[in-house]
Image (tube, rainbow, N blue to C red):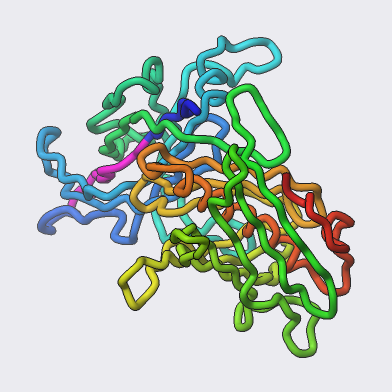
């Protein structure tokens, strides 16, 4: 099968240059007005915003003396549909549609919020237009240098240095129980049983010839913590993701642990998950991901985002809903069918964990309420 076109937009090398307050009469050098940490909120089009620290550099550095942090600040992953959305002309009903715009807001203070209100103080904003034409075919630097992020009356503007580049990121895309034009459906079978504890679930992924190429097996039951009706982080359920080892044997590839995180005031519970890679010949696992997904709405999970080269991205629709999870696997990480199948099995395990972590006071959806062989197809 052919990969689907994706583009990765990377923002990095942040550096913030602030104007220096003039010294008082008879005083020495000027005083930097923002000794506290600063950070940026970065947004691309309709995609969720991301936050990153903005290191301060000396204000007397020249424009050619950029001292960037070198760190990746944000990574946006654009599908073919996203690229087409940006390529369309704005209309009366969609005025925001059009050329991709990277919006950056700079704040003074530490990241976070107090009583739902952002704790940082807005210093300024800037917008950078990005030309993504041809980005799915070859890498390009879309911006590099200093930009003004606003000014007040009688004050010089703060300046932000950043680098924005776009890179092709082709991926194989799989979807359960659906066949859009550019997708191939992996064959899979699952078994589920419900009792006083949720245990014995498994998912087997087959290639198009019918041969099993990956397996997700629930090795630790999902049980409620004493005195509660929820699976807690202190006693999570667990899956092993396995790959064929030859002669009908299987070898472990990864371990997934899941639990239910209690939501705070005004927020819903979440599915907590932790994934470790099991490397042959190594006596310890390699931590890859530790995050949450909102239980009521579902969402996406991703692996190895810190390197801006996700091993896999998957989605789940939320607890109690009929699932059609989608799996995206970077071409660079697929050398054979077993490679892709392992990620598909992992995505299925995360999706089923949304149900396995459902409160025990609530019933499972009917597809999982009794033994069936067509839960995932």
Query: Quick check: 231 above or below 367?
Result: below
Query: Quick check: 260 above or below 59?
Result: below
Q: Provide the residue span drawn in magenta.
A: 10-23
Residue 185 in percent (x, y) is at 64, 36
Query: Quick check: 5 above or below 192?
Result: above
Q: Residue furthest bottom?
A: 226
Residue 22 lies within the magenta run: yes
Location of residue 216 by image quarter:
bottom right
Q: Is residue 266 visible?
A: no
Q: Is residue 140 visible?
A: yes
Location of residue 330 by image quarter:
top left
Going 42% across and 62% down the picture, which residue do you hit?
288
Going 51% across and 53% down the picture, which residue do you hit?
342
Q: Nearer the viewer, residue 143 or 86?
A: 86
Residue 107 in percent (x, y) is at 42, 49
Left or right: residue 294 versus residue 134 is right
Left or right: residue 376 versus residue 119 is right
Going 56% across and 12% down the picture, which residue do you hit?
88
Q: Nearer the viewer, residue 104 or 367?
A: 367
């Amino acid at each position: 099968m052919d990969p689907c076109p994706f583009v990765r937009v990377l923002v990095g090398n942040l550096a913030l240059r602030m104007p220096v307050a003039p010294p008082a009469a008879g005083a020495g050098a000027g005083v930097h007005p923002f000794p506290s940490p600063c950070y940026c909120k970065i947004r691309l089009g309709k995609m969720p915003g991301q936050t990153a620290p903005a290191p301060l550099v000396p204000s007397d550095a020249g424009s050619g003396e950029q001292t960037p942090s070198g760190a990746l600040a944000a990574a946006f992953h654009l599908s073919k549909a996203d690229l087409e959305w940006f390529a369309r002309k704005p209309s009366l009903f969609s005025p925001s549609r059009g050329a991709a715009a990277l919006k950056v807001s700079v704040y003074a203070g530490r990241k976070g919020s107090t009583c739902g209100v952002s704790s940082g103080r807005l210093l300024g904003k800037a917008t950078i237009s990005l030309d993504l034409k041809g980005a799915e075919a070859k890498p390009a630097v879309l911006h590099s240098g200093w930009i003004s992020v606003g000014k007040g009356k009688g004050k010089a503007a703060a300046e932000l240095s950043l680098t924005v580049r776009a890179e092709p990121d082709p991926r194989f895309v799989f979807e359960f129980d659906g066949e859009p034009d550019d997708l191939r459906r992996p064959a899979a079978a699952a078994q589920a049983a419900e009792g006083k504890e949720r245990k014995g679930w498994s998912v087997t992924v087959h290639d198009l010839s019918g041969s099993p190429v990956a397996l997700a097996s629930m090795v630790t039951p999902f049980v409620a913590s004493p005195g509660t009706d929820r699976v807690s982080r202190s006693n999570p359920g667990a899956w092993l993701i396995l790959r064929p080892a030859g002669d009908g044997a299987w070898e472990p590839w990864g371990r997934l642990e899941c639990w239910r995180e209690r939501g705070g005031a005004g927020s819903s519970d979440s599915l907590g998950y932790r994934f470790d890679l099991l490397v042959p010949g190594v006596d310890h696992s390699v931590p890859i991901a530790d995050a949450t997904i909102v239980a009521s709405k579902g969402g996406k999970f991703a692996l190895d985002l810190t390197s801006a080269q996700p091993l896999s991205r998957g989605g789940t629709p939320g607890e109690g809903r009929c699932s059609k999870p989608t799996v995206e696997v970077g071409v660079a990480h697929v050398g054979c069918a077993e490679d892709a199948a392992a990620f598909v099995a992992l995505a299925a395990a995360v999706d089923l964990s949304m149900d396995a972590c459902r409160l025990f006071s609530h019933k499972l959806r009917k597809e999982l309420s009794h033994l069936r062989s067509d839960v995932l197809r």
